[in-house]
Image (spheres, rainbow, N blue to C red):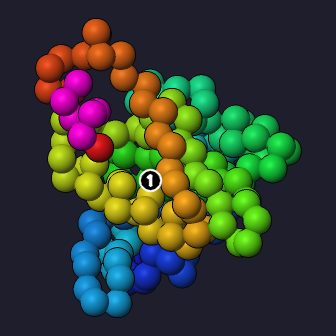
Amino acid sequence: MNSKKAKVTTVFEPADILFFDSLKYNPDGIIVLMKNLLTATPTHWNEHLSDRQGHLLQSWNWGEFKHHFGWTPQRIQIDAAAAQILFRQLPLGFSVAYIPKSPLVDWTNREQCQQLFSAIHTAEKKQRAVFLKVEPDVWLDDASPQQAQAAQTH
């Protein structure tokens, strides 16, 4: 696909996966230079997770399982970084957002973290999430000091 510009908020839908080259900001919100936009398949998402040793609770199947219990999965991928966000509707049109067992991100790569979390925050705003719970899959006793510090600051 050719590169296109689009507002993130106009393309986030459940079961869509987004690939981004980079995020740029302007007064109207986040503008994305898109490398590819396609509807994800369970196979593609799970292979990406497996290649990077992602956690089972970030798998496509887990998102679909949680969907049967009132959660709506959204999947975001920016190059190697990825996250499955689960949203649960609350009264008055609000929701809560939850990322089980950490997004796939290099916690020591500040730019990668900022890009992924910018896209996550955009999805949160669209879903009117009152909070985001991120359950890191980082064991502080096994992590290097840099990884531990990075995980605590995001």
30 or 21, nearer to the observer = 30
Q: Residue furthest left?
A: 146
Among the 4 quarters of the image, the one containing residue 74: bottom right
Where's residue 138, x and y in %? 36, 23
Viewer-proximal residue, 75 or 149?
149
Amino acid type, callout 1: Gln
Q: Is residue 52 visible?
A: yes
The residue sitting at the right extreme is 68
**Label 1 environment density (alpha carbons within 10 Å; few <14, some 14–19, many ≥20):** many
Position of residue 98 measured from the top left corner of the image (x, y, whole percent): 57, 45
Q: Residue at x 28, y 33 (%)?
A: 151
Q: Which residues are magenta?
A: 148-153
Q: Please provide percent x and percent y for residue 16.
A: 61, 62
Question: Residue 49: within the magenta?
Answer: no
Image quadrant occupied by the C terminus:
top left
For disc 1, the marked residue is: 77
For image coordinates 50% across by 77% down, the residue present is 9
The residue at the point 66 percent across, 67 percent down is 94
Left/right placement of residue 43 relative to residue 137 reads right
